[in-house]
């Protein structure tokens, strides 16, 4: 009786997913769960990708896939948080520790603009001594010189600044916004379940990450959200992460995109325990689940940086409508084993090969060029 009921429930959930209905956390747990007998009782990845692709088509019916040309400028690698999945950080006083000067950062911005950059992604470690004025002065200088979109400082960095300055999240965010901050990246999310975060030595808790994002949204600072899988978390913990993102988005509407990627183990302390990467097939499955689960977030990005360009192209048929960044410079994931590289022409070609129209955007997903066919449509309507 119980097994029949379980099968019946799965059939009903399958039908609802096929229609694009949103499922609850408990219902998703049934979808990805296993039978006690008779093998796995879960919906095939192919079906999930198909339904996620339909959702993408409903949200983005013009056949456009966007991308961004930016540079991940790391202003400093000094960090007081010793995350076991990170190979980037250096502690204060380490011979390899650095803090770039404002002029050094400005030169990186100039190079990015010269290469067709549509914005600057700027992140660093949790520096225990840099004052808030260092950050606000930098933002003001970059805005004065270049008027470039500044997508900077993930929630753990905001948390760290709050610790250093003894100011509230709101006070820190207001100061940064007034100095020129345009939007906030979703880094430091990893898995928003404290059982996992404590094991991986993340100082910023899941609730603190969410509170900072909610405060940013209240201040009308748009943000992205992320998930990094492969940290030893369970499928249910991945679903809990997605549920927390969806609930916050339902309150604020401030997330402009969701970006899942996979843990890169090379050279990290955690890599000694979890040396294997998440397979592409598993990544694509969770990309599709993310698209279906987060029906209230308009954009989903596939991580070609961790999956390769072929994996990126496949992801565009698993619910993603964005191929991400050219990444003129990237110093966090690449040293941990993400060896893939691309230029703007490669991204545009990959989008076309996948059957879509490439359009450049900025960090908040504002399109910076006209969609192919838009002029023809406008002429036809006149």
Image (cartoon, grey):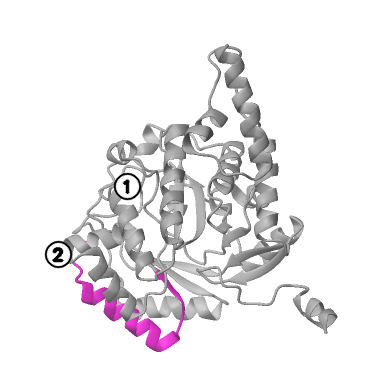
As displayed, is residue 299 above or below residue 54?
below
At horizontal 73% and vertical 62% (from top left) the residue drawn is 63
Q: Nearer the viewer, residue 340 or 221?
A: 221
Residue 166 circle label:
2
Is 97 positioned to the left or the right of 366 in the image?
left
Q: Secondary structure at mark 2?
A: loop
Give the class, few, some or many, for how many residues have Cα within 10 Å of label 2's Cα (few <14, many ≥20): few
Outermost residue, left side:
166
Residue closer to the observer: 231 or 274 = 231
Name which quarter of the figure residue 43 lies in.
Answer: top right
Q: CA distance from mark 2 to mark 1?
A: 20 Å
Residue 100 position (above or below residue 278): below
What residue appears at the point 33 percent right and 76 percent down from the top-left corner? 177
Q: Which residues are magenta?
A: 127-151
Which residue is depicted at the point 50% across and 48% down?
261
User: Could you say where residue 260 lies in the image, as x and y percent from the top left?
Assistant: 51, 49
Magenta stretch, overall SS: helix
Q: Quadrant of the C terminus?
A: bottom right
176 or 255, which is in the foreground?
Answer: 255
Q: Nearer the viewer, residue 304 or 382?
A: 382
Residue visible at 27% across and 42% down?
A: 201
Please say whether residue 217 is one of the residues in the magenta stretch: no
In the image, is residue 146 part of the stretch drawn in magenta? yes
């Amino acid at each position: 009786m119980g097994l029949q009921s379980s099968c019946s429930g799965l059939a009903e959930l399958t039908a609802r997913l096929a229609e694009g209905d949103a499922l609850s956390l408990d219902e998703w747990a049934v979808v990805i769960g296993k039978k006690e007998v008779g093998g796995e009782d879960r919906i095939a990845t192919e079906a999930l990708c198909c339904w996620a692709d339909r959702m993408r088509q409903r949200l983005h019916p013009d056949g456009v896939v966007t991308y961004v040309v930016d540079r991940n400028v790391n202003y400093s690698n000094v960090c007081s948080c010793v995350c076991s999945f990170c190979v980037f950080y250096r502690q204060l006083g380490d011979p390899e520790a650095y803090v770039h000067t404002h002029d050094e950062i400005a030169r990186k911005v100039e190079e990015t603009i010269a290469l067709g950059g549509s914005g600057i992604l700027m992140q660093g470690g949790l520096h225990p001594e840099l004052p808030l004025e260092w950050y606000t002065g930098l933002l003001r200088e970059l805005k004065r010189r270049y008027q470039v979109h500044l997508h900077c400082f993930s929630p753990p960095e905001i948390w760290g600044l709050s610790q250093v300055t003894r100011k509230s999240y709101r006070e820190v965010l207001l100061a940064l916004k007034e100095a020129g901050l345009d939007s906030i990246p979703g880094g430091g999310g990893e898995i928003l379940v404290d059982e996992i975060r404590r094991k991986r030595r993340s100082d910023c808790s899941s609730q603190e990450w969410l509170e900072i994002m909610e405060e940013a949204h209240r201040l009308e600072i748009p943000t992205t959200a992320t998930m990094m899988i492969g940290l030893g978390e369970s499928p249910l913990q991945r679903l809990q992460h997605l549920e927390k993102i969806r609930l916050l988005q339902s309150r604020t509407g401030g997330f402009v995109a969701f970006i899942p990627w996979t843990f890169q183990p090379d050279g990290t302390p955690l890599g000694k325990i979890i040396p294997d990467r998440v397979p592409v097939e598993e990544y694509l499955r969770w990309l599709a689940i993310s698209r279906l689960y987060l029906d209230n977030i308009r954009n989903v990005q596939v991580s070609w940086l961790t999956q390769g360009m072929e994996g990126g192209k496949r992801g565009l048929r698993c619910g993603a409508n964005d191929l991400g960044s050219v990444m003129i410079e990237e110093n966090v994931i690449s040293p941990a084993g993400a060896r893939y590289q691309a230029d703007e022409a490669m991204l545009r070609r990959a989008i076309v090969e996948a059957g879509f129209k490439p359009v450049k955007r900025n960090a908040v997903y504002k399109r910076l060029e006209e969609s192919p066919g838009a002029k023809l449509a406008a002429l036809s309507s006149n």
